[in-house]
Amino acid sequence: MNPRQPSHPLTELVRIESDPAYRALFCAELDAAILDRFANRSAVVAEVRAAADRLRALVPHDGPGPSA
């Protein structure tokens, strides 16, 4: 395909649907991307929890709470 020629917007989808080997590769790459995103999300959640724990450690818990 000529890089200057615009491709049809559904060309990739047609190839995924019609070529079993390409579909398998696409699905494997999609699965890997989903797992990577989940791992990154889990790491961020762990960092936020650790930061919250550090902040809780800075707040004194033995005295009365804020006056209202």
Image (spheres, rainbow, N blue to C red):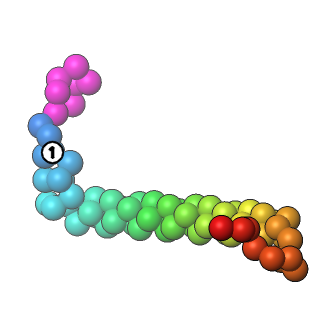
Q: Would you say 46 lies left or right of 9 here?
A: right
Q: Quadrant of residue 55?
A: bottom right
Q: Which residue is mark 1?
A: 11
Quarter of the figure that contains the N terminus? top left
| Residue 56 on image: x %, y % | 78, 70
Q: Quadrant of residue 25?
A: bottom left
| Residue 19 on image: x %, y % | 19, 60
Farthest residue in the bottom direction?
62
Q: Which residue is found at the position 38% from the left and 62% from the top?
A: 30
Q: Main secondary structure of the magenta part?
A: loop
Q: Is residue 2 magenta?
A: yes
**Magenta-tinted stretch:** 1-7
Q: Which residue is found at the position 15% from the left and 61% from the top?
A: 17
Q: Would you say 51 lies left or right of 68 here?
A: right
Above or below 5: residue 53: below
In this view, the residue in front, 46 or 22, is 46
Farthest residue in the top direction?
4
| Residue 37 on image: x %, y % | 50, 61
Q: Which residue is found at the position 33% from the left and 60% from the top?
A: 26
Residue at disc 1, secondary structure: helix
In this view, the residue in front, 7 or 38, is 38
